[in-house]
Amino acid sequence: MFVCDDVPVADIARDAGTPVYVYSAGAIRDAYTSLDRALAGHPHAIHYALKAQSTLAILRLLRGLGSAADANSGGEIDVALRAGFLPSEIVFSGVGKTSEEIERAVALGVKTINVESAGELQRIEQTATRLGTRARVALRINPDIDPESHPHISTGMKTTKFGMSTREAMSLFGVIGRRPSLEAAGLHVHIGSQITSLEPLRKAAALAAGMARDLRHAGVSLDHVDVGGGLGISYDASPVPTFEAYARTILGELRHSPVQLLVEPGRALLGSAGILVTRVLDVKTQHGGKRFVVVDASMTELLRPALYQAFHRIQPVSEAGPSEPPETADVVGPVCETSDTLGVDRALPRLAVGDLLVIRDTGAYGFVMASNYNRRPLPPEVLVESRPSTELRAGPSTALRAGAWRIIRRRQTIEDQLALEE
Ligand SMILES: Cc1ncc(COP(=O)(O)O)c(C=O)c1O
């Protein structure tokens, strides 16, 4: 029986319906506190990357743990504020910022704007001058480092659209020094996502730390070096670097730098804390002999497999009997696209219509990429709160529903969708 922090997943599916995202508050807490503890040897701030998952209840949970925020759009700035983050706790990233987004970030006085180009720096300066204020900026470096990840989520090579060369950044820091409405707050580098080798992350941190040193010698004292996010998780149970190994690697490069370290993790905090629960709609064998399990989740709830052939473990909620041999099948959604495949050639017990499956490690880049394609509603999200063992022994909590889970976002209705239309 698949459980999330002692709560049977089947109970949640019965009450909340399927498909449904389920997150463990305990797992999020554990990930955050482990990373924070691992970085304790150096002044640091964890700016959780909202792009990975930005539902209000999850953001409030992270903020309660001490997290700051990394917003990648005006919408994410608004959501971060709504969740209680102060402007001084928000860094604003993004490869193309609209004039409205720049104006909002400058007027709010966010902790820093991560600047992507000379043109963008000029637009920020003009905005700050017009508003009679000073904008705190960090320049985003493109270090030309291969993160050894999927090409679609590699952002630190010079063939990609992100950031600027170190040479251009060094010259722009000179420009910033001459502009009264700009303040040089830091350096930013984010080379990609789902990075499972520490060496590229070490190289990027070393480059940023070296630049911060060179700048100090040239009379520019930065407040922080932001090494971005990118630390990968294990989608297939193979080993990946721990937070301790990651922190040792990064801090090793920043040891002698008096600057604050900023990190912007998304996936590493949320990825393994969430599952997508889905129900079997049909089981069929095609005339060539290939077997398909059709489920009620699809690329509209979880885009990663269709977008970059991402692998997620898929498991039945009920355990198979010991004598049942597994059968190989593709797990597919109901959307009329062949790419709507959630798992290829998976060995699963014999399944029947109505059975429940769990798609694992979908806490990050899952719900946030969901769409209304085929007029499918956005799924609900559930947060499970683990209870202290004393309370568990005492029976169901009175404050929370038995099992201590709650819906943090309801399922979208067709009325919600049509409310925007003529
Ligand atoms: C600028 C920036 N920071 C942080 C992140 C979070 O990355 P991850 O979820 O891999 O930690 C991203 C995502 O790619 C990003 O673009």
Image (cartoon, grey):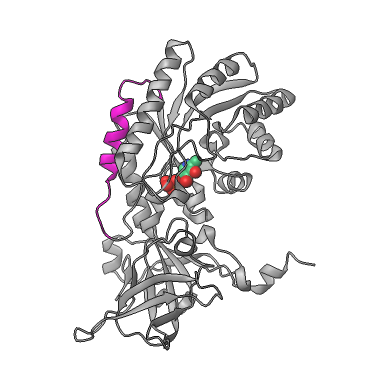
Tell me where residue 11 appears, x and y as whole percent. 40, 77
| Left-right relation of 245 to 75 | left
Front residue of 167 and 31: 167
Q: Residue 326's image quarter?
A: bottom left
With respect to residue 308, does 346 lie above or below? below
Tell me where residue 294 appears, x and y as whole percent. 45, 80
Query: How many numbered marks, from 0 up?
Result: 0
Query: Is residue 64 visible in this depiction of the protein?
Result: no
With respect to residue 286, does 341 lie above or below? above
Tell me where residue 202 appears, x and y as whole percent. 32, 34
Viewport quadrant of the N terminus:
bottom left
Front residue of 303 and 53: 303
| Left-right relation of 17 to 73 | left
Q: Residue 111's image quarter?
A: top right
* Residues rendered magenta in the picture: 237-259
Tell me where residue 41 appears, x and y as whole percent. 29, 30
Q: Residue at x 53, y 28 (%)?
A: 139
Q: Residue at x 33, y 29 (%)?
A: 42
Furthest residue in direction front, as rendered: 288
- Is 19 within the magenta? no
Viewport quadrant of the C terminus:
bottom right
Front residue of 289 and 109: 289
Q: Residue at x 49, y 15 (%)?
A: 220
- Is 258 within the magenta? yes
| Left-right relation of 375 to 221 | right
Furthest residue in direction right, as rendered: 422
| Left-right relation of 122 to 61 | right
Query: Is residue 78 visible in this depiction of the protein?
Result: yes
Q: Residue at x 26, y 41 (%)?
A: 244
Q: Residue 2's image quarter?
A: bottom left
